[in-house]
Amino acid sequence: MKHFSHPHDLHIIQVPSENKQRKCFGCKLPLFGSCYTCSSCNFYLHKFCFELPQAAQFESHPKHTLGLLYPPYIQGGCEACGEPCNGFTYNCSLCNFNLHANCASLLETEHKNDRERYIAMFLRHKVSEQKKSTAELGSMKAQNQHNEDEQARIRQMEIESDLQRRRHNLYMQQLKQTSDSIDFMGQIGTSNYTYRY
């Protein structure tokens, strides 16, 4: 079988228990259950990831159809969770909108009853909070970096000011010593010495 994300033929295997050493190329999660693999290289896809549609419409971005991309063709973070896009990601190139395939499947599931609808709503809320927290953390880091830069600049100014003060004091001491020696020479030059033979 062929998949758009890989140039070689793939065949299906069964992974009896979770294999944490090998990860799915699509979702970056450990392998388990039915998976597709390439006999030529270390490429693996969960059956679920293999079957993802290459284009889809989502409630979270109803204006445009999103295309399924894979690294290195993705830039930016997921609009749902805020994490970098390093696996299969649905992308709108017109709006620069990204949605992890996993996040899309969590957020866009058809709900059979109120309990499932509530769980999905709760998950959307948690994802939204996480995204907001991630943005706030980024803002705080930027502010903290600005404060650290400002403190470093102030320390540098204090060091330069201290150095300038020391130079000034040294200059004043040298000037005073020079002035004292000039006064001493002046006293010698004006003294009346009488020589007797």
Image (tube, rainbow, N blue to C red):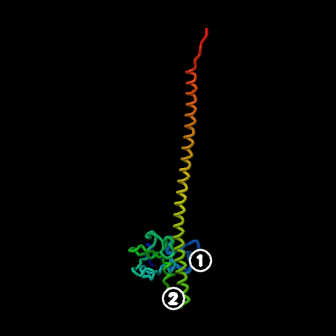
Asked whether the residues under the numbered discs 1 and 2 touch, taking CB atoms below 8 Å apart as contact, a structural biologist would say no
- Rendered residue at 56%/27% (across/down): 183
Q: Residue furthest toward the top?
A: 197
Crowding around mark 1 (Cα neighbors within 10 Å: few <14, some 14 to 19, many 20+) is: few
Mark toward the viewer: 1 or 2: 2
Cα distance between the residues tagged 1 and 2: 28 Å
Kind of residue at disc 1:
Glu
Crowding around mark 2 (Cα neighbors within 10 Å: few <14, some 14 to 19, many 20+) is: few
Any mark on residue 111, and which?
2
Please state the horizontal and vertical placement of residue 194, each as a whole percent of the image.
59, 14
Please state the horizontal and vertical placement of residue 186, each as a whole percent of the image.
55, 24
Classify mark 2: helix, strand or loop: loop
Residue closer to the observer: 168 or 20:
168
- Rendered residue at 56%/48% (across/down): 159
Kind of residue at disc 2:
His
Residue closer to the observer: 122 or 21:
122
Residue closer to the observer: 90 or 118:
118
Q: Earlier in the sequence, mark 1 or mark 2?
A: 1
**Quarter of the figure with residue 18:** bottom right
Does 37 sit above or below residue 140?
A: below
Q: Residue furthest toward the left?
A: 94
In the picture, measured across the screen, residue 168 lies left or right of residue 3, that is: right
Please state the horizontal and vertical placement of residue 197, each as a whole percent of the image.
61, 8
Name the residue tied to disc 1: 18
Residue closer to the observer: 48 or 98:
98
Classify mark 1: helix, strand or loop: strand
- Rendered residue at 45%/79% (across/down): 1
